[in-house]
Amino acid sequence: MPSRFHRFRKKVHDVFFASLQGRMVLLAIILTLVLAVVFSVVSMASVRSSISDSAAAQSRKDFNELVNQAQKFLDSADTTDRSESQSLLIDLATQLQDQGSPSVSGISLLPQNSKNSSVTPVSTDPNTAGLISSSIRSKVSSSDIGDIFYQAADLAQKSSRSQPEPGAVFGTLLQFPGREEFELFTIYSYRDQQDILLSIERMLSTICICLSLAVGFLVWLVLLSVVKPVSMVASAAKKLSEGDLEARVKTTRSDEIGVLQSSFNTMAETMDSQIEQLEQAGVSQRQFVSDVSHELRTPVTTIRMASDLLLSRKEEFDPSTARTVELLAGQTNRFESMLTDLLEISRYDAGHPSFTPVEEDLRDVVHSSRDMLAGIAKTRGVDIRTTLPQYPVVATYDNSRMVCIVKNLLSNALDFSEGNPIEVMLAETQTSASIAVCDRGTGMTEEQLGHIYDRFWRADASRSRTTGGTGLGLAIVLQDVKLHHGCIEVHSHLGEGSSFIVTVPKDPAESTEDTPPVSALVFLDSTSLDVVRPALQLSAEPQRSEKDGCSS
Amino acid sequence: MTSEKTIMIVDDDLALGEMLSIVLESEGYRAVTCSDGLRAIKLFPTIHPDLVLLDIMLPGMNGIGVAKVLRETSHAPIVMLTAKTDTRDVVTGLEAGADDYIVKPFKNSELIARIKARLRFTPNPEVAHSGTGVIRRGDLVINKTGRVATKCGRDLQLTPLEFDLLSTLAQHEGEALTRGELLEKVWGYSAGGDTRLVNVHIQRLRQKIEDDPDNPLMVQTVRGYGYKFMRQGAVD
């Protein structure tokens, strides 16, 4: 039960605070109701008192007349007989009841001394006779002739009405000439006045409820005209916060709401232009990097040609000059490849990498990249073994980028192979193709794996770069793979080697980012598993696997 | 030296132009430099170079425009020098008539290899109609000795490169050649050539030899593999 109550309270709380409109309407209704009720209670009290005062005055006046008539009647009567006296009293009571005002509910005539009186008490309505209290009787009986006494009474007990029926008992002493004295009591009912008061009360409560509902409705209407434009601004602000910089509000008014609308629009405009400026700055900065790398290429070409020429005439120089020329040529090469990679990365940063996919045989990619690095591999004494299908593996890809991917992976593998053979494999599924480059060299730790795509990051800072790695290679590979809607996986064990597996959809146009190409593990599990496993001593579950591009 | 080949260098960077001529001259070529696109067009007929090294970014007229103008009057091989590999410039340059391109910065050996590959054969008018080494395919006649191809007796006006491409394909008639193989046989790349070279020049060749270049009958694409010169029966 307490939890249900708690839930109910929470629900009320939620409803109350969730909607500004609901809250204001509820408050308006409650406040109006309270005010109207207070006003009604106050006015009812004054109406009640004035009505009861006038009723009391009316009945007093009526009673005076009745007393006069009764006295006259008694004075003119001439009876000595006891039985005649009794009937005379009955006549008098009936006559008074008839002549009195309609509010007279009952007339009672009581002998002053009931014990030794010759007559019995007379009452036109015995029910009302019980309302005559002993206190008023004693007051009347001990009073002088002509004094009038009054006491309020509730006639509800007399009738069967459940509502209270106010009334009054008037009493006085009458003189039966020459005989004993009688007490006259008249009971007045104020039922009519009470009915009027009740109907006024009912009307007032109806007015209270109607008024508060009307005020609530009015408030709702007013709020609607305020809240609707405000909520439109609110929804536009929400859109803006979600990154829709084009979100604006229609300016519909010239009042405060209109100011809000136009201010919002101005704010959005300012923000939009600020962001645009920032973007422009970013773009121009990236463009600058791209331009610088591009502009540097022409002088580097001249330097490169000069150093090549000098290098080809190395024999003509003395040993120290010859060595200088060698160093110049080596460093020029290094500088040049860094420049190439920098230009490539800056193209990605600037957001316009070239991508011209053509349907070709992926085996050519492996051949080309292997041939490009054959020289370096030979001088290192590293064997590059390729395992390719006997049939063409046709996919749609950008040839130069795919060659760049495999070349970078191979050159990386060469750097870390420690003289062990490198495996390059190619396999396909129905919709995707995978190229794996595996070395049995140094391998990487988990911590190192997390950084391999960072720019200018080195697995081992003390290790020299011998194949001319620029530190941008894997960053470019990752971008290239993403450009093909593919993904790259890395499996590495420290001291056992690393394996990079690039998987690309055969048709990048059909692949969306939501449905990444079939994992290369499928490929590992199928045809080439026997080759990969001994190469890496892979356990069934790779110790650490980094998969990039697939989930992005 | 009578066999000395003349190479025209069109590049606005004077240092690079001079360096290029030093390297070329050390290889036994005669080099003429020119740093302006419009001047290059004016100079071309007077020098009559055997090969043009053409930078894309030039004052006066850019390299693509120069290539287009030169190609109208001459079949001299044009090798573009470019710093940009990613832009449409390379493809547009090739479409404008350039035979090959080389990306800055390049190795001297690479440059010389490219130039040598382009200067391997020069048309020899004396043996043009000798009738030896002739391949006939329907209307098409390929005279390998004279390095002339005709269709219905009309000279197809093929550039030396286009001729090499056609005769290489025709020699392997009915056999599909990969782009890599074509790059090696025609352009002289041992590895890592740009396959766009093949695609663009196949298109240019088709424009000249096919009745309907959009529906080629002689040189057909082998999807995901390369290109094939159809056997005569298949052509008919």
Image (spheres, coloured by chain):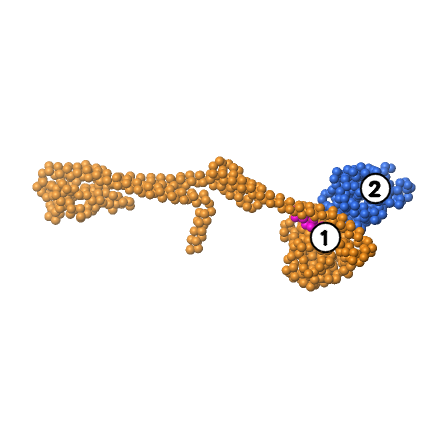
Please give left or right for residue A228 compared with residue A509 in the image: left
In the image shown, does A414 or B226 lie closer to the viewer?
Answer: A414
What separation in Å lies between label 1 and label 2 (alpha carbons)?
A: 34 Å
Classify mark 2: helix, strand or loop.
loop
- Image quadrant where residue A436 sits: bottom right
Q: Name the residue tied to disc 2.
A: B49
Q: Name the residue tied to disc 1.
A: A335
Chain assignment, label 1: A
Q: Which chain is orange?
A: A
Please give left or right for residue A414 compared with residue B138 in the image: left
Q: Which mark is residue A361?
A: none
Say which residue appears at 80% left-offset and 41% top-offset: B205
- Image position, residue A323 (x, y; %): 78, 57
- Image quadrant where residue B217 sits: top right
Classify mark 1: helix, strand or loop.
helix
- Image position, residue A546 (x, y; %): 65, 57
Chain assignment, label 2: B
Kind of residue at badge 1: Phe
- Image position, residue A371 (x, y; %): 77, 54
Q: Characterize the magenta stretch by its predominant secondary structure.
A: helix
Say which residue appears at 13% left-offset and 44% top-offset: A143
Classify the position of the N terminus of chain A by image quarter: bottom left
Residue A505 falls within the magenta-colored stretch: no
Q: Which chain is blue?
A: B
Give the class, few, some or many, for how many residues have Cα within 10 Å of label 1's Cα (few <14, many ≥20).
some
Say which residue appears at 32% left-offset and 41% top-offset: A40
Please give left or right for residue A188 compared with residue B55 in the image: left
| Residue range corresponding to the magenta coloring | A334-350
Kind of residue at badge 2: Pro
